[in-house]
């Protein structure tokens, strides 16, 4: 049996669904099919710390996040989703624990101001005043984003999925694409059930993208990195903003009900997504208590592990590959945060062949030319 689609999107996470939705909004006559080997929210989009920030160092990331912020703010109307996505603009504080990171924050602050995004560059004392529970040692300054905050990944994904289906997008979960084969000017996708004949294909499987692209001769330097998180039992609410320590890879956020969410990025060879790596819990807890001593008395409730995509410059990949009509959208761990804008830009590229957005520098061809676009503020 053969199914047909104008555009087939492989990967039904935040980026894949955002691409599908934007395509149907631009051209309602398109037949758009989304295929995901997992279930709803079972991938990286459902395993994150729920934070959103506009605090980046590069123009394109800042502009993508600025556009995405407007979508999150108006999610109820944007997606016709009355229950909302639990988006709260309670701010995000990046803390510099050395002079090198402070220099990066100063540079990013100037770029944010130039692009009209609100931020506050803080001295060491101002950073301590912003969060009085920080350990006093090694605080060199900070950068605060008042328009940053948190959202519910599950509500946001459900809003995207609901909107896609309302627009006529077919979304198939638990359906694995085994192979992409160029056929004429289009492609045949082999799945476990039936083949799909698609005029255009967008690969949005993030860290798994190379598995589909390598067999057809496309070398995409995307690798996997384990990223784990823990949540504590409810405790007294004393943190009113998200806090990130870029130099240490640590993120801390307290929920309204008192639970604390902590993530720590570490280099680990094992990329299994279903097991927390040995030593991670101790490493995360130790680093968190070092930065925020009051956490020493917090009781850990549970941990979970996910995978993020890494690229040589830790930037997303957005654009057409060397194979005409075959596109890729890899988030480089920024999936939910930038997905509304990434979806819009990708739909523009797919339907018109180009974009004027500054993120056009994130095309896959940059790896061949060596024009990498490093991000200074990764966590």
Image (tube, rainbow, N blue to C red):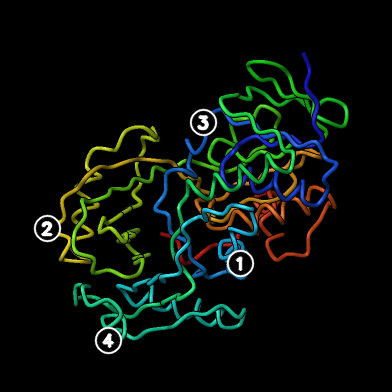
Mark 4 nearby-residue class (10 Å; few <14, some 14–19, many ≥20): some
Q: In this view, does 89 lie to the left or right of 12?
A: left
Residue 210 x %, y %:
59, 35
At mark 3, the secondary structure is: loop
Q: Name the residue under label 1.
A: 70
How far apart are the two marked residues, 1 and 4, measured between alpha carbons? 32 Å
At mark 1, the secondary structure is: helix
Q: Which residue is drawn at 60% across and 24% down?
A: 175
Q: In this view, does 223 lie to the left or right of 70?
A: left
Question: Where is 44 relative to 367, above or below?
Answer: above
Q: Residue at x 26, y 55 (%)?
A: 259
How far apart are the two marked residues, 2 and 1, measured between alpha carbons? 38 Å
Contact (CB < 8 A) between labels 2 and 1?
no
| Disc ID at residue 297 | 2
Comparing 368 with 180, the one in front is 180
Contact (CB < 8 A) between labels 3 and 2?
no
Q: Mark 4 points at which residue?
A: 125
Q: Answer whether residue 252 is visible to the viewer in this image.
A: no
Q: Name the residue under label 3.
A: 39
């Amino acid at each position: 049996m053969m199914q047909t689609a104008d555009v087939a999107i492989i990967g039904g996470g935040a980026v894949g669904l955002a691409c599908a939705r934007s395509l149907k909004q631009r051209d309602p006559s398109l037949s758009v099919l989304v295929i995901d080997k997992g279930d709803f929210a079972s991938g990286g989009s459902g395993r994150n710390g729920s934070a959103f920030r506009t605090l980046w160092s590069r123009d394109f990331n800042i502009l993508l996040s600025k556009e995405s912020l407007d979508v999150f703010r108006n999610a109820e109307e944007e997606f016709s989703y009355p229950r909302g996505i639990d988006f709260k603009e309670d701010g995000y504080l990046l803390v510099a624990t050395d002079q090198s990171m402070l220099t990066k924050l100063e540079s990013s602050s100037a770029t944010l101001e130039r692009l009209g995004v609100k931020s506050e560059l803080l001295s060491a004392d101002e950073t301590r005043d912003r969060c009085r529970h920080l350990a006093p040692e090694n605080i060199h300054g900070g950068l605060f984003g008042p328009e940053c905050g948190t959202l519910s990944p599950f509500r946001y994904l459900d809003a995207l999925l609901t909107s896609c289906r309302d627009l006529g997008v077919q979304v198939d979960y638990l359906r694995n694409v085994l192979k992409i084969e160029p056929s004429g000017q289009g492609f045949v996708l082999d799945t476990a059930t039936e083949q799909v004949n698609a005029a255009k294909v967008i690969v949005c499987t993030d860290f798994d993208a190379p598995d589909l692209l390598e067999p057809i001769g496309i070398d995409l330097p995307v690798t996997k990195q384990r990223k784990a998180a823990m949540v504590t039992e409810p405790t007294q609410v004393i943190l009113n903003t998200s806090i990130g320590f870029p130099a240490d890879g640590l993120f801390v956020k307290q929920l309204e009900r008192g639970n604390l969410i902590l993530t720590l990025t570490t280099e680990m060879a094992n990329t299994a997504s279903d097991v927390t790596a040995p030593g991670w819990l101790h490493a995360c807890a130790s680093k968190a208590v070092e930065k925020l001593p009051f956490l020493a008395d917090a009781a850990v409730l549970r941990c979970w592990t996910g995978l993020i995509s890494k690229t040589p410059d830790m930037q997303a990949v957005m654009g057409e590959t060397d194979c005409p009509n075959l596109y890729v959208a890899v988030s480089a761990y920024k999936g939910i945060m930038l997905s509304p804008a990434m979806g819009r830009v990708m739909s523009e590229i797919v339907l018109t062949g180009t974009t004027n957005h500054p993120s056009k520098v994130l095309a896959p061809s940059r790896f061949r030319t060596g024009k990498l676009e490093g991000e200074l503020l990764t966590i």
